[in-house]
Amino acid sequence: MTATPRASFQPATGHDARSLSLRLRHTLWRKAKAWRQRVLPRRLAQHVFVAGMQRSGTNLLMDVLDASASTQVFHETDARAFERYEMRDLAVIRQLARQCPAPVFVVKALCELDRIKSLMETFTPAHTLWVVRDWGDSVNSAVKSFGNFVPQWQRLAEGDADDWRGRGMSAATRELLAALYHPDASEAEGAAIMWFYRNVLFFEQQLAADPRVRVVFYENLVQQPMREVAAVYAFLGLPGFNAAKARRIHAHSVKRRRPPDIAPAVTALCDELLARFAALPARKPA
């Protein structure tokens, strides 16, 4: 199977799926907050990395963090910190952090999932919020937004590690991709494989035992926003829990619909990894 023309023009990672009115309101809020921070800058106290697979709810979590007056946030669409959705050189990020007028510097790290451990060591003190979404809903959303999953799967199975998808991939994961690959796989199956090989990096980096890291389940965030937003703010030590922001979060995107045309072995693989995340003990504030 070859990539469709449409897929070749799609971005390497996510796009902003929020409504225009919401994006405009958010832009106004950010401009007002940035003005206040320039007038009354405060010393940087910590760095926060928002990680996870694309189409897992990281934009929502970034908005939750941006609702705090104590944060400066950098989405992967921000050219100051990213180029083609990938984080710029560490020297650039370090300079942005030095110039941060807020106590908490927040930056997306989707294409950098393999580097979370090293990023936290480089930028200290640091915390990571890793967003996990039910793989079925994530796959359904990804297939609507992107394409080319099966050719990517084949390329990675053959050993290619030239871009962020294969960077840091373990030999065991690559062997698994090679064993499961078949050329007539559906795009949904390719997206499911991607959900697996990106999220398994969490365990391969031994982040489950790292007190600086908290898993945020998308379903919990949208179904119990008051509780989950409060827990995220407490974990980071963020003041001013934003109840108004939490009340605007809704669970309309939680379907838990398994995509069709996925081999049982791939379904089992994703189910097992999701269960590993679900079995993690709740991370309490430091």
Image (spheres, rainbow, N blue to C red):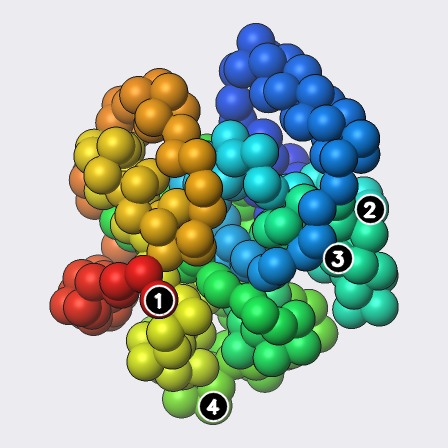
Alpha-carbon neighbours of circle 4 within 10 Å: few (<14), some, or many (≥20)? few
- Residue holding disc 1: 286
Q: Looking at the image, tell me whether mark 4 or mark 2 is earlier in sequence order.
A: 2
Alpha-carbon neighbours of circle 3 within 10 Å: few (<14), some, or many (≥20)?
many
Mark 1 or mark 4, whichever is nearer to me? 1
**Residue occupying the point 82% across, 46% down:** 80
Q: Nearer the viewer, mark 2 or mark 3?
A: 3
The label nearer to you, 3 versus 1, is 1
Residue 77 position within the rendered picture, expressed as x and y whole percent measured from the top left: 70, 40
- Whether residue 247 is situated above or below residue 262 in the rendered picture: above
Identified by mark 3, the residue type is Ala
The kind of residue on which mark 2 rests is Arg
Asked if marks 3 and 1 touch (Cβ < 8 Å), the reply is no
Choose between 179 and 65: the one closer to the eye.
Answer: 65
According to the picture, the residue beneath numbered tag 2 turns out to be: 80
Q: Which residue is mark 4?
A: 171
For the residues labelled 4 and 3, the Cα–Cα distance comes to: 34 Å
Q: Quadrant of the C terminus?
A: bottom left
